[in-house]
């Protein structure tokens, strides 16, 4: 087993991981390195957003009916352009687009990628951390016939997943199924360096993340679980930390310990199956958290990674974080008759 040394570059670690698989073609290595480049480009634009007249809304809405921010458009186009001619991808899907996204003719590869180009983009104008989330599968179709079937695969079939968070520093976290590693971008040299090797989510969980503005619409199972977390036991209660950007809330909990919930509620019919997207948010985060020793389930106890997607923009309830806390949440939700 290769030792993960702090300070090595992300490209070096990606190459080292490839050496662990003698039959590897190098395509996944190339794909991840192209994502690194896309992340650097987006990071630079995010840092310049206040000066470059790209803050605010673009005047468009995405498939979810949400207003598209200008940086959303930039991030989406940046990833598409890197992926469509990298030669490693056969088909793409973006949270911002209705249909599958083909690659350029002659550049078809062996992998698929689904991505949320800028998660938490409603927070752009107030300078809150936002991020890019990605999920990679091996294609299942024959060459020349890539389509939805290649993208609609279970999370257990992911070969890689990760995110890039743009905050006080830009950090990339990813897994290829052999642990989770985090890299911090040094803007002076334009390179990601290993800063968080072999991330393990802490067992002691000081934080819970949930949008309590919806509390009057919660089912009793959610209300009872959150009330339990607020109780002080052994002199310690849980602290609420909710940013409203999944990638930011998840990253904090991954490093510090915590549980994030976005369960179903009674507020509106369209949220009856949850709010977060399976392909672009829940499945990649679930792969990361399980590799780090945590869990990710729905509010009816289904393992996120076992869910077979039925559509590109399928939504799911999500409970994710430290294993003991997710286990506890599962007991509260499974005991409910709702």
Image (tube, rainbow, N blue to C red):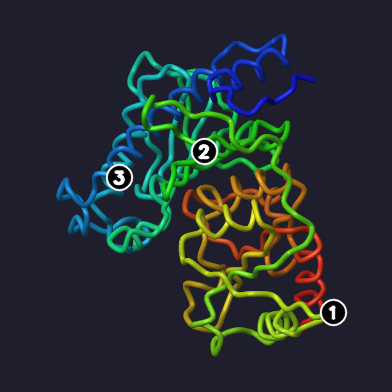
- Give the mark nearest the N terminus, 3 or 1: 3
Nearest to the eye among marks 3 and 2: give it.
Answer: 3
Q: Residue at x 38, y 49 (%)?
A: 118
Q: Residue at x 65, y 16 (%)?
A: 16
Q: CA distance from mark 3 to mark 1?
A: 43 Å
Q: Position of residue 102 (x, y in %)?
A: 37, 30
Res 81 quadrant in image: top left
Q: Residue at x 47, y 80 (%)?
A: 268
Res 56 quadrant in image: bottom left
Crowd around label 1: few <14 · some 14–19 · many ≥20 (10 Å): few
Provide the residue designation for mark 2. 172
Q: Is residue 17 above or below residue 298?
A: above
Provide the residue designation for mark 3. 47
Q: Quadrant of the N terminus?
A: top right
Crowd around label 2: few <14 · some 14–19 · many ≥20 (10 Å): many
- Give the mark nearest the N terminus, 1 or 2: 2
Nearest to the eye among marks 3 and 1: give it.
Answer: 1
Give the farthest residue toward the right. 234
- Please state if 264 lies on the left or on the right of 227 as rendered: left
Secondary structure state at the residue bearing disc 2: strand
Q: Is residue 28 above or below residue 226?
A: above
Q: Is residue 101 above or below residue 83?
A: below
Give the farthest residue toward the left. 53
Q: CA distance from mark 1 to mark 2?
A: 36 Å
Viewer-closest of 284 and 169:
169
- Give the mark nearest the N terminus, 3 or 2: 3
Q: Position of residue 42 (x, y in %)?
A: 33, 38
Provide the residue designation for mark 1. 234
Q: Residue at x 84, y 79 (%)?
A: 234
């Amino acid at each position: 087993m290769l030792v993960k040394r702090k300070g090595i570059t992300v490209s070096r670690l990606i190459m080292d991981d490839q050496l662990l698989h003698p039959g590897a073609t190098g395509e996944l290595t190339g794909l991840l390195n192209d994502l690194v480049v896309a992340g650097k480009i987006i990071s630079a634009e995010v840092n310049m957003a206040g000066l470059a007249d790209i803050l605010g809304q673009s005047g468009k809405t995405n498939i979810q009916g949400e207003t598209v921010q200008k940086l959303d458009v930039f991030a989406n186009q940046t990833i598409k352009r890197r992926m469509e001619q990298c030669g490693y991808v056969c088909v793409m899907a973006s949270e911002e687009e209705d249909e599958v996204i083909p690659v350029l003719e002659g550049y078809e590869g062996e992998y698929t990628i689904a991505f949320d180009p800028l998660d938490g983009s409603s927070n752009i104008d107030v300078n809150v951390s936002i991020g890019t989330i990605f999920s990679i599968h091996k294609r299942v179709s024959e060459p020349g016939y890539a389509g939805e079937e290649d993208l609609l695969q279970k999370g257990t079939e992911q070969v890689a997943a990760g995110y890039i968070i743009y905050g006080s520093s830009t950090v990339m976290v990813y897994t290829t199924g052999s642990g989770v590693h985090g890299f911090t971008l040094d803007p002076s040299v334009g390179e990601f360096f290993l800063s968080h090797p072999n991330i393990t989510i802490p067992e002691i969980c000081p934080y819970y993340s949930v949008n309590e503005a919806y509390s009057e619409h919660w089912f009793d199972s959610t209300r009872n679980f959150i009330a339990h977390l607020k109780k002080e036991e052994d002199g310690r209660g849980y602290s609420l930390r909710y940013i409203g950007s999944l990638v930011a809330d998840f990253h904090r909990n991954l490093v510090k310990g915590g549980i994030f919930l976005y369960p179903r509620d009674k507020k509106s019919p369209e949220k009856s199956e949850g709010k977060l997207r399976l392909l672009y948010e829940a499945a990649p985060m679930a792969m990361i958290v399980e590799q780090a020793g945590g869990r990710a389930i729905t509010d009816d106890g289904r393992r996120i990674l076992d869910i077979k997607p039925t559509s590109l923009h399928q939504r799911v309830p999500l409970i994710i974080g430290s294993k003991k806390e997710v286990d506890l949440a599962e007991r509260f939700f499974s005991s409910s008759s709702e």
